[in-house]
Amino acid sequence: MSAYFEIAYAAASGRLCLFTGTGFSKAVTQGAAPNWQELLERCCDTLANGADLKAALFPVKGNNPLALEEAAQVISIELSKCGKSIYEEICSHINGISLSGDNSAIQDVLHKHSVSIITTNYDKLAEALIGDDRCHSLTPGLPIPRSRNHAEVYHVHGSIDSPDNMVVTSDDYFRFINSESYFSRKLSTVLHENTVVILGYSLSDTNLKAIISDYKGLSFKQIVSGNIFLVSRNAVSQYVKDYYSHCYGMRVIDGTEIADFFKGVSASVVDAEKCKDATVNLRNVLNNGYHYTDDYIKISSSLYEIIAAVGAIGKSVNDQKVVSVLADIIEKKRAFTQGIGAWDQYVHLARWLVYIAGIVDIASLTIKDKYLASALHSMNTMSKSLTKGYSWHAYDVWDAGWSNISSANRAIIATHIRATCMNADALGVVNRP
């Protein structure tokens, strides 16, 4: 829930960037859009020796002998012998692809909110979803519009608008990776200034890794708004999630189709729209001596609003004033659990603690001890069964959310709980991998 709220808040604030790959194009065309290998195989079909070439590069059994960009280089050489261009061939296979199926959930978000889209796709499907007249389509080698529009689509590997500038072969990739242009600098700025959601890529995609490699750890070490989310239609193991969290500060939303992801964002936008004043409120708290009211802190969503506002105003989670605010609201939320009939506060506290441990490095915060004290209180007062005086809903939060906490934070929390807590249900949670 908090991840969708965070993304919806970014959309409502005009700070959402979608990073789309082949899987996105397939999703909005009911699978009609080809993936990269399928595209290269179609290029082979235009050659007299195409069947043999295809069998050599893409054997039915076993692994491909070459990476796809290397295979593209081979195909490009063969096409050039016949006076053909691999770039023109690719364009011919993409030009006829159009939107199909129910894309209403995606279009609802893209039409209502100003977004940036970075894509490695050559097609213009993102522009079709938004509306050609409502977005700028930017491609290396073509002029960059100086006017503003509702949305911007950056074709990082080129597009069918400029075939000669498409990144396809290994030679192209070498130039792309080693180039430093206005376009690449602009992309870096967009990535660093927005909440980034990656759609239609596998976690093993080399293109994805190359483009975001300089983004490593930004969400933990600098600005919370630098959080990266990857949406995967398949389940992702905890080990893999931990790896990408550690290396790229990336959170994974798995087992989710692209259309369902956008439905989740839309469902959270109404609440996010109500919270856009959170940035003004945070500035007043940090700079003008204001304090959040008890009534506000008692609301479940208040922490998510504050965290989102931290990123929106460009603050770091290590900023001493921000740290003091977090310490204050966590302490107050823990105190609220002591009130009569305050069972909802137990659940809120558990959600907050799980959420914080999923997005920041606890060890780097000066409030580490206060965080652990609150975690101990939360776990001491929760129960897996319906035990009087204990919150079973708080247990459900820790039980379901433990895998969303970073591996380093899980280790810190587990060590503290094992040393200080006798609650068997709490130990059962923290002793999981």
Image (spheres, grey):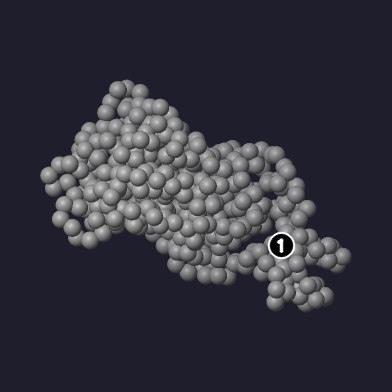
Three-letter residue code for mark 1: Leu
Q: Check the image and report above or below for 156 versus 328.
A: below
Is 390 in front, or is 361? 390
User: Where does residue 378 sit, x and y in percent of width and height?
Assistant: 27, 46
User: Where does residue 108 sit, x and y in percent of width and height?
Assistant: 41, 56
Q: Residue furthest top?
A: 288
Q: Secondary structure at mark 1?
A: helix
User: Where does residue 358 sit, x and y in percent of width and height?
Assistant: 42, 47
Residue 184 left/right relative to 378: right
In this figure, which residue is indicated by the disc labeled 1? 68
Q: Check the image and report above or below for 341 versus 37.
A: above
Residue drawn at point x = 15 percent, y = 42 percent: 339
Question: In this orientation, does residue 294 appear?
Answer: yes
Is 115 in front, or is 250? 250
Residue drawn at point x = 44 percent, y = 56 percent: 433
Residue drawn at point x = 12 percent, y = 44 percent: 340
